[in-house]
Amino acid sequence: MCVCSSKGMSSLLQPSPASIFEQMASDLQQQVEAMDKLSRAVFQAQPLLWLEPAGQGEPRRDGAAQAGATEQEPESGGRQDKKFELRMDVAGFSPEELTVRQEGRKVTVMGRHEKQSPGEDGDSFVEYRELRREMLLPAGLDVEAVTCSLCSDGQLRIEAPRLALQPAEGKAIPISLQAGEGATQGDTAAKEEKEVGSGSQET
């Protein structure tokens, strides 16, 4: 027969603090993974963001506002000399955590930040952020000369020079001479009168 004290029974029924912390850490990791999967699904389903130059043709679509990106028009001599400039807020990401890829007019900005910090009682906290934006540059840009820079205020700046408009070459159009409608009718009437006169003489 085994006799257990109430204190011993209490220690057997109550989980240790270490096991509680491990369970909380496991639950937190599962939530982070679930949010990661959800964010990836949302960004993959998001259509391309179209950005058109301000003041030309159709108004800019609301994709720029959703992406947190704004187009800037640096002032210079004429519009043909201006550069296309796009700014995006990427505060909280270091240059090493950002990747910018270009495929023709399509530009993709990706960022991933993960930092583990120690907390109280020997536990640790994980800070995680992810960014993905896709944009389509407007036509009329030199896509081979696109540059990207990160400003100290957390703004990612994408620039591209505009293509110079080639002046249309003029050409001479030859002029052909054609008889007018009145002259054509007169020639026909004179020919008919001549034919009638010839017939009367034969009779």
Image (cartoon, rainbow, N blue to C red):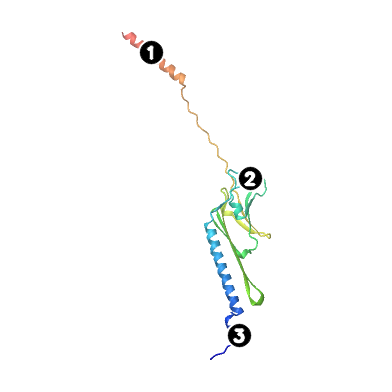
Q: CA distance from mark 1 to mark 2?
A: 70 Å
User: From what the image shows, is residue 117 above or below residue 150?
Assistant: below
Residue at 46 percent of width and 21 percent of height:
181
- Which dot marks residue 194? 1
Residue at 60 percent of width and 85 percent of height:
6
Quarter location, residue 146: bottom right
Q: CA distance from mark 2 to mark 3?
A: 86 Å
User: From what the image shows, is residue 91 above or below residue 30?
Assistant: above
Q: Earlier in the sequence, mark 1 or mark 2?
A: 2
Furthest toward the bottom, the residue is 1
Give yes or no for contact between labels 3 and 1 (Cβ–Cβ under 8 Å).
Answer: no
Q: Earlier in the sequence, mark 3 or mark 1?
A: 3
Percent across and percent down for residue 185 are 43, 18
Percent across and percent down for residue 103 are 53, 56
Between circles 1 and 2, the one closer to the viewer is 2
Residue at 60 percent of width and 79 percent of height:
18
Question: Mark 2 Cα within 10 Å, few/some/many (few <14, many 20+)?
Answer: few
- Which dot marks residue 6? 3
Give yes or no for contact between labels 2 and 3 (Cβ–Cβ under 8 Å).
Answer: no
Is 43 on the left or on the right of 179, as rendered?
right
Quarter location, residue 189: top left
Q: Of the residues shown, which amino acid type is indicated by label 2?
A: Arg
Of the 4 image quadrants, the one containing the C terminus is top left
- Which dot marks residue 79? 2
